[in-house]
Structure formats: C-alpha cells, structure tokens
Amino acid sequence: MEAMTSDRVEGGVQRIAMARPHAMNAIDLTMRHEFEAAMLAATADPDVRAIIVTGQGTHFSAGGDIPFLQSMNAAQFKEYHRDVLGLVRAIALCPKPTIASVRGACAGGGFGFALGCDYLLASQTAYFSAQFLRIGLVADMGTGYFLAHRLGGHKARKLLLDNRIVKAEEAATIGLCDELHADETLDGETLRLARRLAELPPRAVRQTKWLMRQAEGSFERFLDAEMTAGAECLGGEEFIEGTNAFFEKRAPRFG
C-alpha cells in the first residue's frame, strides 16, 4: 500500500494508519481505496478483534484534497461521493470495535472517519474542524449523521453552522471525544483500550453493534441525502469562491 499502513500490533488488535504525513494525511483516491481495502480485510480476518484507526505523523487527517475536488463537475463529484461512501460504511458498519486515535488536525472528511468509530481518543494537540461551509460545501463522509448522534441534533447543527475549529479540551467537555490524553501517552492509552475491547466476546459485540444501529435511524437514507446536497453545492459559485479564498488565505465573500 502507498497511502495506508495496516499491521497487527499485538494479539487481536489491528492498527490501520493513513500514511501521507507530508500532506497532513489528506484524502486522495489512492488513500480512499487502500483505506477501504484495509478496513474490509481487518473486518474479514477472524483473528482481528479490535481496530485502531489513526494517522502517521503529527496529524490525523486534514480531510479531502481540495485541488482534486476543484477538478470535478457536479456529476463527477456525485459519482466520487457515492464511491467514497463505501469507505464510510466500512468504518461505521464494522462489526468489530473501532477506535479513532487522533492527534493534530482532524478535519473535513477525516473528521467523519474519526466520528464513525466506536471510540474517539484524542491527544491535547488535537483540533477538530467541520468547516465545510467555509468552502461552500455541506458536511460529507457521514459527518452530520455522526455528529447528531454524538452531540444531539441541536448541538450538531450549531457546530456545523458556527463553522469553526474545536480544540481538544472543548471537544472533551462537549463529548466530541471520549478520552483526552497527553500526546506522549495517546498511543499507549489507545492500545490499552483496544486490548480490553479485543477480549470481549466477538459474537455478542457484533450483535450489540447491530442492535444499537437499529435505534439510530436510517444511515443509508442520510447518506443518500448527503450525496444530493453535496452535488448541489460542488462546482457552484459558492464553492469556487470558498476554495479560491482558502488558497488565497482570505475571508470568502459569498454573494
């Protein structure tokens, strides 16, 4: 794999890491396909009992590759969006316990990947950003769905409309992350939790996760709506202004 690593840490714990540290682990096509393949392989492996999702280097993920998004028209984006949601499903519907281990930037689609895990552990260097509106887009990668179930509908809506960065301590206070650790202890604490989860009865864990999904509303219906809303925004005047402003390091001026 070029953009991901996947290795057995110990026992039944698999660590899957985004491996583009030079680009803050921004999500490109290669990473998207390798990430899904790694998740599906770990899910299918009976010896894997818990999965850690993380990023190499000092950041979890900066989110989508904006120049790549700029290159697509609405129809191409809708096709890409449909394709990449396969990865979101591989994370969110994984029948095994999953833990996101986050340091540094956790933004955009990368934020959605972290939220799709069962646990989100963060270091004090972590910061979370769902600033999709800044570039004229709606939240993607299931981010809106996961936020609503983690924070409640009103707080999730407010976070998206506030269009701001949430630092680690606030994230822990509002329930955006489950545990907050010093950067030097994050990996050890993540592994400690993964070991504990790997010792649970796998069939009962699988059925527990399935059962709880029945109480959460239709994930598939939400993803269909996300694709429709995203295709409506991408390539439009607001997206063009938002991305130009991002690269020019200025405030966007929307109509």
Image (cartoon, rainbow, N blue to C red):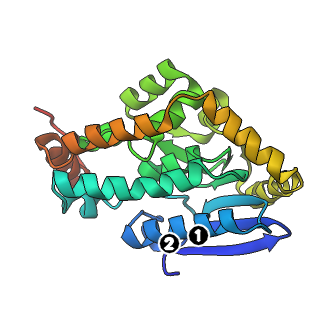
Tell me the element at label 1.
helix
Q: What element carries label 2?
A: helix
Res 34 label: 2
Q: Is residue 87 visible?
A: yes
Residue 76's place in the image compared with 205, above or below, is below
Amino acid, disc 2:
Glu
Can the viewer see residue 56?
A: no
Q: In this view, does 73 lie to the left or right of 51?
A: left
Q: Which residue lies at the image location 70% right of the left edge and 35% below the top edge?
A: 211
Residue at position x 86%, y 69% in the image: 11
Q: Position of residue 204 (x, y in %)?
A: 82, 45
Residue 222 sits in which quadrant? top left
Residue matched to label 1: 38
Work out whether residue 200 or residue 180 is closer to the camera in this orientation and state it: 200
User: Is disc 2 surrounded by few (<14), some (14 to 19) or many (20+) residues within 10 Å?
Assistant: some
Q: Residues within 10 Å of mark 1 (few under 14, many from 20)?
A: many
| The C terminus: image quadrant | top left
Which amino acid type is shown beneath numbered disc 1? Ala
